[in-house]
Image (spheres, grey):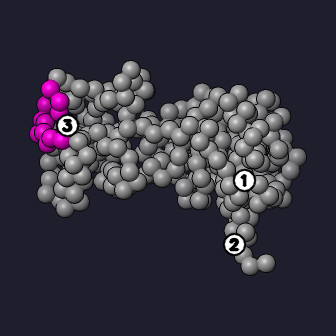
Amino acid sequence: MTDDYRDHGPRRVGQVKEVTSLANPIVKDIKALSQKKTRDETRTFMAEGLKLVIDALELGWTIRTLIYSKAAKGKPLVEKIAAKTVASGGLVLEVSEKVMASITRRENPQMVAGVFDQRWMPLRDVKLSTGQTWIALDRVRDPGNLGTIIRTADAAGASGVMLLGDCTDPFSMETVRATMGSMFALPLVKATVAEFLAWKASSGAQVVATHLAGAIDYRTVDYRRKPVVLMMGNEQSGLPEELARQADVLARIPQSGRADSLNLAIATGVMLFEARRDLLKLDEPT
Ligand code: SAM
């Protein structure tokens, strides 16, 4: 399988095309990116909105296709990203609002969208240093949760997000939307549980796993001792024994009321900002 975005006969990079037909094959290919199978095959994905596209380009992501609706034509920022896209060999599509609505599956679509190459960091390239916090998510299933976690991780100064086992796709439209651009700022890693455990053994990481039955209050953990991997369990079933057993700390966020647990993204936010609060002490004069 090539990682090239699908081609239609003659090379069509570095051009600007006007498209008004929903039957246009390039439009059909972009729409097919709503399916994971197509994203996996082409190793691309779509991000909507001018801010996200600018963020991605500024952070060096490779754009394959820039799509903008006619109403955005002539706007200086749009012209700028169109020129950047053409200069990097990408395709620029100027489309009707009807085509934009169909591509983004929204009645009131954004005026700009981009198709980008996916990017994964290999687990072996994750080298930890003091003061770093990574997140490891066990089989996260909900795209909104994953997007919110990536956004929160970025805001809390985390170093990256690891997806363990069968996780929802970070490059789905729903997840990308929920990240609000943060997915372009943080490395994403995917690994099996076995790969993660093998990596952990020599990584120097302190794995702080969160668990409803954790014996340690999350506010008493020393997040400064070693680089931290915050491990979070699946929405329905929590952390499996295999991962809980291998954690260095099993931490619990004390709750009151009738809720039996916190939402996964909320729990991750609570943990991230507690780790950050502790880590900021590293910068304080002693
Ligand atoms: N029924 C699941 C269970 O028994 O673990 C609930 C999973 S909870 C919705 C998803 C994840 O969020 C948990 O696996 C854990 O990582 C984290 N979490 C939620 N509430 C927590 C709490 N009060 N203390 C520690 N972790 C919590």
* Magenta segment main secondary structure: loop
List x then y, in percent, for residue 235.
Answer: 65, 36
Q: Do we see residue 152 in this rendering? A: yes
Q: In the displayed structure, would residue 51 be above or below residue 191? A: below
| Among numbered discs 3 and 1, the one appearing first in the sequence | 3
Residue at 33% from the left image edge and 55% from the top image edge: 54
| Among numbered discs 1 and 2, the one appearing first in the sequence | 1
Q: Give how far apart the Cα atoms at labels 3 and 2 are.
A: 48 Å
Element at label 2: helix
User: Which residue type does callout 1 highlight?
Assistant: Pro
Toward which corner of the image does residue 283 lie, by quadrant? bottom right
Toward the right, the furthest residue is 215
Span shown in magenta: 10-23
List x then y, in percent, for residue 93.
Answer: 18, 41
Element at label 3: loop
Tags 1 and 2 in contact by the CB under 8 Å rule?
no
Q: Give how far apart the Cα atoms at labels 1 and 2 are.
A: 15 Å
List x then y, in percent, for residue 203.
Answer: 72, 43
Residue at 40% from the left image edge and 54% from the top image edge: 59
Q: In the displayed structure, would residue 214 be above or below residue 2? A: below
Q: Which residue is mark 3?
A: 13
Q: Which residue is mark 2?
A: 283
Q: Do we see residue 108 in this rendering? A: no
**Label 2 C-beta lies within 8 Å of the nearest ligand 1 atom:** no
Q: Give how far apart the Cα atoms at labels 3 and 1 are.
A: 43 Å
Residue at 53% from the left image edge and 46% from the top image edge: 187
In the image, residue 19 lies in the stretch drawn in magenta: yes
Element at label 1: loop
Q: Which residue is mark 1?
A: 227
| Among numbered discs 3 and 2, the one appearing first in the sequence | 3
Could you classify mark 3 by the number of other residues whose Cα lies within 10 Å: few (under 14), some (14-19), or many (20 or more)? some
User: Which residue type does callout 2 highlight?
Assistant: Asp
